[in-house]
Image: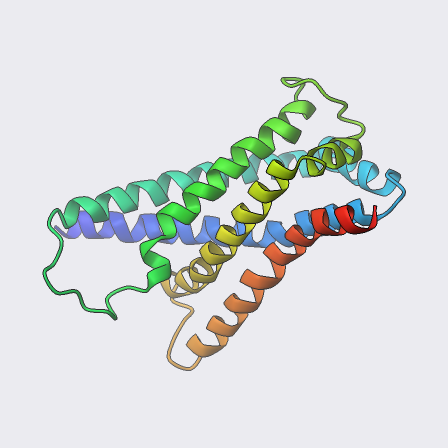
Amino acid sequence: MNKILFSAVSKKFVMALAGLFLLLFLPVHLGINLMLLRSDPEPFNNAAHFMATFPLVKVVEILLLLVIVIHIAYGIFLQIQNWLSRPVSYAVRNKSETSAFSKFMIWTGGSVLIFLVIHFFNFYFIKLGLVEGDPENFYAVAYSLFAVPGYVILYWVCFLLLGLHLYHALQSAFQTLGWSNEFWKPVIRVISLIYAIAVPAGFAIIPLAIWLFK
């Protein structure tokens, strides 16, 4: 029993560290994407080229992909383990047992995974030469995608769900790592809320601005 418990706790710890690494990457990605709002495609294309060719960035890219795989795999494993540990629903549930956000983390995370797969096909696989497209002009690739209403709607929905995922994920990570207590918990909650709104909104506003002003 102790071995099983330790295994679950250790997996949550690793998943929390992986999640925090991804949380640090998102603002960097957003900063690059905001260059799409410029009329000149060169800054965005230069940034994309740098991210694709600079040796240190390529090492970080491999680490990032590994972290994504670990975060997803551990998240699915822990959710399945949680389901199997409660094969029968309780007749009466304690409302404080878990938040609404934590109940739906697997589903919001799944929607983010679907978007990642689409995103890889549209950008990362072009860079690898697996999908047709110009890896030196991702600015044009992005604009062509944002010209498709269905893609933009999917984009907005996924980032809305990402915001819900981030709000709980950030608080959960701090708690798992032992960095949350009664004093810091309200502060962490506010920081989580600001991050969960600001980052997805930053991504979501890009296609809207392109539609309205480009």
- Residue at image coords 81%, 41%: 44
Q: Position of residue 180 (x, y in %)?
A: 41, 71
On screen, residue 25 above or below 91: above
- Residue at image coords 25%, 42%: 80
The number of numbered badges drawn on the structure is 0
Dividing the picture into quadrants, the one containing residue 69 is: top left
Q: Nearer the viewer, residue 90 or 124?
A: 90
On screen, residue 4 above or below 186: above
On screen, residue 122 above or below 203: above
- Residue at image coords 63%, 42%: 152
Q: Nearer the viewer, residue 72 or 92?
A: 92
Q: Nearer the viewer, residue 5 or 74?
A: 74
Dividing the picture into quadrants, the one containing residue 71 is: top left
Q: How is the image coloured?
A: rainbow
Q: Position of residue 37 (x, y in %)?
A: 80, 49
- Viewer can see residue 183: yes
In-image side of 52 versus 111 (left or right): right
On screen, residue 175 above or below 53: below
Q: Quadrant of the C terminus?
A: top right
- Viewer can see residue 71: no
In-image side of 67 versus 44 (left or right): left
Dividing the picture into quadrants, the one containing residue 140 is: top right
Q: Position of residue 167 (x, y in %)?
A: 47, 62
- Residue at image coords 76%, 32%: 138
Q: Position of residue 81 (x, y in %)?
A: 22, 44
Q: Nearer the viewer, residue 103 or 208?
A: 208
In-image side of 166 versus 131 (left or right): left
